[in-house]
Image (cartoon, helix red, strand yellow):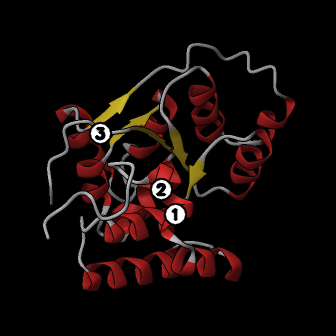
Amino acid sequence: MSVMADRKGVIIDSSSAILLFKAGIFDCAVAAYDLIVTPSVACELTRSGHDGSSHFANALAAGSLKTAENGTREYGIPELSRLGQGERDSIALYLSGSGIFIVMDDGRGDRICRDMGIPYINALLVARILRDCREIDEDRYAEAFGALLRVGRYSADIVSFARDCEKNRLKDFYPAGEPGKIGSN
C-alpha cells in the first residue's frame, strides 16, 4: 500500500465501514482516504459485541479514523428524518462543509444523496477503486468483492455498475483524483 500526501477527507457511515471491515479492506480504505465519522457513527461502530468494534475503537484512538461533529441537529430537510441517526448525521456533516463525498450503503440514504446532488459511493465501489488505484491486487479485490456480495444487499444493477463502469465515471472518488496514479506498480 502507498502512503498518500494529500488524502481526501471522506465521510463514511457505519454500515459501509462494517462492510469494508467484513470484506477485509477497511484498513486499505483508511490508508487511501482520511475517513471521517460522526459521533453517532463512532458510537455505532464501537458498540460492544458488534463486528469489528474493537478494531474501530483502535482506529479511532489512533486517529486513523477521525470523528467530526456535524455542527447542528436542525437539518431543515424533511427527507433526512426518514434515515437512521448515523446516515442522517453523515449527510448533515457533508452539508456542513466536511468531506468531499460520502461512502454510504443505505438505500434510502443513497437516494437522498442522489436527489440532493451529494457525491457518494458504496462499499463495492470502494473495493473497485482500491483495485483500480493498485491499493489492492486483483486477487484481494475478487475476494473482497465476493465478501461484499455475501454480506451486503445490492441490486443486480448496482453490482453491474460497480464491476463495469468506466474509470472516468469514478475519477472524482479516486484517492489521488485519477485512476492508476497511486500505489505500487
Residue plotted at (17% across, 34% down): 62
Circles 1 and 2, Cβ within 8 Å, touching? The answer is yes
Circles 3 and 1, Cβ within 8 Å, touching? The answer is no
Residue type beneath disc 2? Lys
Residue type beneath disc 1? Asn
| Mark toward the start of the polypeptide (3 vs 1) | 3
Local SS, label 3: loop
- Which part of the image, by quadrant, shows the N terminus? bottom left
Residue 116 in view here: yes
Task: Please tell me how crowded label 3 is: few (under 14), some (14-19), or many (20+) other residues with Cα within 10 Å.
Answer: some
Q: Is residue 108 left or right of residue 86?
A: right
Task: Please tell me how crowded label 1 is: few (under 14), some (14-19), or many (20+) other residues with Cα within 10 Å.
Answer: few
Separation of disc 1 and disc 2 at Cα?
A: 5 Å
Q: Is residue 108 left or right of residue 40?
A: right
Circles 3 and 2, Cβ within 8 Å, touching? The answer is no
What percent of the width, then of the height, locates residue 64? 23, 38
Badge 3 is on which residue? 7
For discs 3 and 2, the disc positioned in front in the rendered view: 2
Badge 1 is on which residue? 168
163 lies above or below 33:
below
Residue 52 occupies quadrant: bottom left
Numbered circle sitting on residue 146: none
Local SS, label 1: helix
Q: Nearer the viewer, residue 167 or 158?
A: 167
Q: Is residue 27 left or right of residue 20?
A: left
Badge 2 is on which residue? 171
Separation of disc 3 and disc 2 at Cα?
A: 14 Å
Residue type beneath disc 3? Arg
What percent of the width, then of the height, locates residue 77? 82, 27
Residue 8 occupies quadrant: top left
Residue plotted at (51% across, 60% down): 170
What percent of the width, then of the height, locates residue 95? 63, 26
